Amino acid sequence: MKLWRVVIFTLAAAPIVSGEKKVDIFGYFESQLMGARIRESFIQLHSNKLRVDLEARLSENVKFGANFDYITYHGKTRWNILEFLPKSVAKEACKFNLFGVEINPYVMEFRDKSFLDNGYLRLSLKYFDITVGKQQISLGTGYAWNPVDIFNTKDLLDPTYEQPGHDAVRLDLPLGSGYSITALCTPEDEFKNFGGLVQLKGYVSHFDIMIIAGQKLWNFHDYTKFNQDFFNPGFQCISQRRTIVGFSTAGELFGLGLWSEYGYNRMEISEDFQELVVGIDYTFDFQTYMMIEYYRNTLGKSDCRNYSLNDWMRFLASEQKAIARDQVYFFMQHPVSEFLNVGLSTIYVISDNSMAIIPTMIYNIYQNVDITAYLNFYFGRECAAFNKNFGNGGMIRARVYF
């Protein structure tokens, strides 16, 4: 959808006011600049994003919501992934020839795009709520990782950034006394591939507890095999059913925030794997907030010398959540003033003894204008999860809400 279509749709919806049937329009504009020093050059990517949110309470029991995103990219919009990988891994890359010309298929290209991020209808019935359409699905209690979330993968440099919407049918059924059931169904190309998930939520003592079971089609690729079909080029896609059972908890004990997540994944083709998160946080009297989270993923490798091209590419493409087996995320933040917060994130990979350090700043320059900035520094040998090949750099983002 082009920008002019979004604008026309928004303007057309604005005057729809009839009694209680009012369309609320809000959103934000965001301009972001990120850069990194790769080899001997400092490369930059600049993006502009317009997000328009529509929300309407059509009746007491009917709600409609939608989000449109329009994003433009500038600067270096074609990134050669092989430049970020260890040389020993880059050698595994396959070759692709088109009419006798060698083409690099390991290029990430940022193209302008516009899309419907969310668009849903929610019906509040007597005994349950049902939501149909493209919608936010957020599962788990972890900050940087969510083992029970089979829909999203967070960016470790910016884990609180909004997640995309997913096409689903959702049912929320309250059971009384603080208990509830959430059921999700996600359509696929064939009925046999439909995904589904059921979550039972309740509480025990000081803790909320969620038990989850579900299955979903998991698509990932073999990045060592490229389909050279002229009409349908691309890396070989491997699809298999992923069945997960797990739980998550969140609560407070002696002033400490505590949470955990666990998921056991049974795979149709590849080996089964497990994920675990355990976290703790605390806010001191002088307002400094500290948090630490441990993550284990048996899909990851315990020795960086065993990281393959497929491991790297699937991790960078968010097809799997980790390349290393054991990691720790540490975060602290302090309000310097009413409008300025400074912080520091550290990701330490126990498996390969590498580290990323990310100083952060959030400045509320005006009531509806925020500036967010961070730097990223990597420390680790060449084969490690965080190494100099990624390039030290940073990001600055300005956002205005309307």
Image: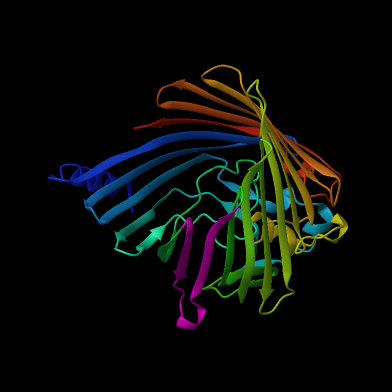
Q: Which residue appears at 20% of the width and 46% of the height?
A: 13
Quadrant including the N terminus: bottom left
Q: At which x and y percent is residue 369?
A: 43, 26
* Looking at the image, residue 240 lies above or below residue 150: below
> Do we see residue 45 in this rendering?
yes
- The rendered magenta stretch, by its main secondary structure, is classed as strand
Q: How is the image coloured?
A: rainbow
Q: Quadrant of residue 367?
A: top left
Who is closer to the viewer here, 386 or 55? 55
Q: How many marks?
A: 0
- In this rendering, would 172 be left or right of 153? left
Quadrant including the C terminus: top left
* Looking at the image, residue 122 lies above or below residue 43: below
> Do we see residue 239 in this rendering?
no
Q: At which x and y percent is residue 177?
A: 47, 57
Q: At which x and y percent is residue 49?
A: 43, 40
Who is closer to the viewer here, 285 or 269? 285
Q: Quadrant of residue 168?
A: bottom left
**114 in the magenta segment:** no
Who is closer to the viewer here, 65 or 211? 211
Q: At which x and y percent is residue 244?
A: 63, 70
Q: Which residues are magenta?
A: 177-204
Q: Which residue appears at 39% of the width and 46% of the height?
A: 70
Who is closer to the viewer here, 29 or 38? 29
Q: Which residue appears at 56% of the width and 71% of the height?
A: 214
**181 in the magenta segment:** yes
- Furthest toward the bottom, the residue is 192
* Looking at the image, residue 297 lies above or below residue 38: below
